[in-house]
């Protein structure tokens, strides 16, 4: 069958051969290892190369030996250019230190790493991915025994040990992969069946099948492809089509983003354009996508086109409250920059909200201990208690498809929530900047804004300085925080009053904060 997405190519392929060479032989000194919200990332070459993979793996091995961590480490990666190579290098180093390794022979989504850890089959994981970043980028993230992203104390140890290895490669121990396999230190196993089977506890696939809603799924060239295939087969979802099975590390088939870069972001209207057109043409009622490592989600519907992540999270939270009968005392977890409509939904049903700093690692404790009905972030990450303490784009897409199958178009459901709780006007503005300005914003404290009493005609109710600066108003809020990966300041704002009021908040807020 000819793919309905045929004819969407918009650019030439990247020079993968040159990037491979830069991975092995960077054109300068390797950058220091620095873990952000999801591991160490950089452009192939000095930003991320074989030295980084080896050094980080040795650091993890040292930590496991020091802390007496028992059990195999799951090593893998998504469909990026050097992901599988990175996984193999990590396996060689771990085996060289006498640690056992699970090394799959297929690309692996980020949530599956987490699922294997919390299921007790792996003690931790090393995952070669740069999420939805452009294909020239590469990264490596570590998940410890709780299954979630590593916390600050642990990543600081990894950085310290890994940078020592960059300075002195003799510290790195390696055992060639073939020998490691022969010695039984490196093994493979079925990683699809356990995840897909367990997902049936979280999503009502029978309801999806019975409703017969016509749905399109796009893995965006990523590691979720085999898992969506397995879901479709196991749960006999004849009404669900996987509309693209294209996999190429150049990701040449993804439409370019707003800035001319290829970015496999399922929440952006640019790479999602083919899926938006599929639902708007009437061929499908619902379309879902996840990024290359499947930790982010996107969806589009016939009535609403591309659904913003904030809207999807609100609909999902309300649906889970109505259908899953959460225990008393549970809450909705959201990050600082995520819509406050979630607060109104939670409060309207008698639940609370936990507002966390940006980074899914801050939700790990709440997910592991069963506090969250839903945990989400405006950048299209979602999970819930009883599931993985990592973002799971596959879960999110399947849950949203369940909701659409049982309750109707996601856009209409969101409109119903705004009629009940008020309509928010929300935006995020990326402000180009430099390192000095980023440091200045990072140094802001509540004390710096103690003279600020009103913004855009509303009283200031409070200020939070744990991750940038967030100012709370009567019916609104705004937040500025520096990006951890780019020279930009992210300015978020939301109001329940009007679009004009939102613009006033942006203008006055940026003026007060000097951004």
Image (spheres, helix red, strand yellow):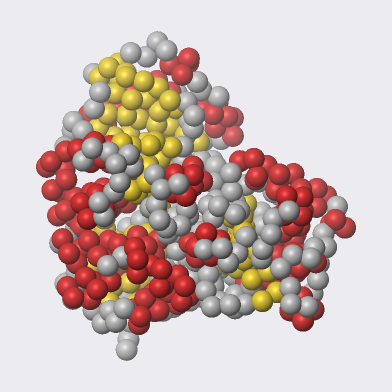
Side of 495 relative to 383 (left or right): left
Residue lying at the far bottom of the rendered structure = 1
Side of 190 relative to 186 (left or right): left
Q: Which of 352 and 44 is in front in this view?
A: 352
Q: Can residue 458 be seen from the camera position used here?
A: yes
Q: Nearer the viewer, residue 319 or 482?
A: 319
Of the 4 image quadrants, the one containing the N terminus is bottom left
Q: Nearer the viewer, residue 504 or 160?
A: 160
Side of 166 relative to 482 (left or right): right
- Image location (x, y in percent) of residue 145: 59, 54
Residue lying at the far top of the rendered structure = 451
**Residue at point 33% right, 25% down?**
472
Task: State how many labels appear.
Answer: 0
- Image location (x, y in percent) of residue 200: 35, 69
**Residue at point 23% right, 79% down?**
239
**Residue at point 41% right, 72% down?**
196
Location of residue 401 by image quarter: bottom left
- Image location (x, y in percent) of residue 203: 31, 65
Q: Nearer the viewer, residue 109 or 471?
A: 109
């Amino acid at each position: 069958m000819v793919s309905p997405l045929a004819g969407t190519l918009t650019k030439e392929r990247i020079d993968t051969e040159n990037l491979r060479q830069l991975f092995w032989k960077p054109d300068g000194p390797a950058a220091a290892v620095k873990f952000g919200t999801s591991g160490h990332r950089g452009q192939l070459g000095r930003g991320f190369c074989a030295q980084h993979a080896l050094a980080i793996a040795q650091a993890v091995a040292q930590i496991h030996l020091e802390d007496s961590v028992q059990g195999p480490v799951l090593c893998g990666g998504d469909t990026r250019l050097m992901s599988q190579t990175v996984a193999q290098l990590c396996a060689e180093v771990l085996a060289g230190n006498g640690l056992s390794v699970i090394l799959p022979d297929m690309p692996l989504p980020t949530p599956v790493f987490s699922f294997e850890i919390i299921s007790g089959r792996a003690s931790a994981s090393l995952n070669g991915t740069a999420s939805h970043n452009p294909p020239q980028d590469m990264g490596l993230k570590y998940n410890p025994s709780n299954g979630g992203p590593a916390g600050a104390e642990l990543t600081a140890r990894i950085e310290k040990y890994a940078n020592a290895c960059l300075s002195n490669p003799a510290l790195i121990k390696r055992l060639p992969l073939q020998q490691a396999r022969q010695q039984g230190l490196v093994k493979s196993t079925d990683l699809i069946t356990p995840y897909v089977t367990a997902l049936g506890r979280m999503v009502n696939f029978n309801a999806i099948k019975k409703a017969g809603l016509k749905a399109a799924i796009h893995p965006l060239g990523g590691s979720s492809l085999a898992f969506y295939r397995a879901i479709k087969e196991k749960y006999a979802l004849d009404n669900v089509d996987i509309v693209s099975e294209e996999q190429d590390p150049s990701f040449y088939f993804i439409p370019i983003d707003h800035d001319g870069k290829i970015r496999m972001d399922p929440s952006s209207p640019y790479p999602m354009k083919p899926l938006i057109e599929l639902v708007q043409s009437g061929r499908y009622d619902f379309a879902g996508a996840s990024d290359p490592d499947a930790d982010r989600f996107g969806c589009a519907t016939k009535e609403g086109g591309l659904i913003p992540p904030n809207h999807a999270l609100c609909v999902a939270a309300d649906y889970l409250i109505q259908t899953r009968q959460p225990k008393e005392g549970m809450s909705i977890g959201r990050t600082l920059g995520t819509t406050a409509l979630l607060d109104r939904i939670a409060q309207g049903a008698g639940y609370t909200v936990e507002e966390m700093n940006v980074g899914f690692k801050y939700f790990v404790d709440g997910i592991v201990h069963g506090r969250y009905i839903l945990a989400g972030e405006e950048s299209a990450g979602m999970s819930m208690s009883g599931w993985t303490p990592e973002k799971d784009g596959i879960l999110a897409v399947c849950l949203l498809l369940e909701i659409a199958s049982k309750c109707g178009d996601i856009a209409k459901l969101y409109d119903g929530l705004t009629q009940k709780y008020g309509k928010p006007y929300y935006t995020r503005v990326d402000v180009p900047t430099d390192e000095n300005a980023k440091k200045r914003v990072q140094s802001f404290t509540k004390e710096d804004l103690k003279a600020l009493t009103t913004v855009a005609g509303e009283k200031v109710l409070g200020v939070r300085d744990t991750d940038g600066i967030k100012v709370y108003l009567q019916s609104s809020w705004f937040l500025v925080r520096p990006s951890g990966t780019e020279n930009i300041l992210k300015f978020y704002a939301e109001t329940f009053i009007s679009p004009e009021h939102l613009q006033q908040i942006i203008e006055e807020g940026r003026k007060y904060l000097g951004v």
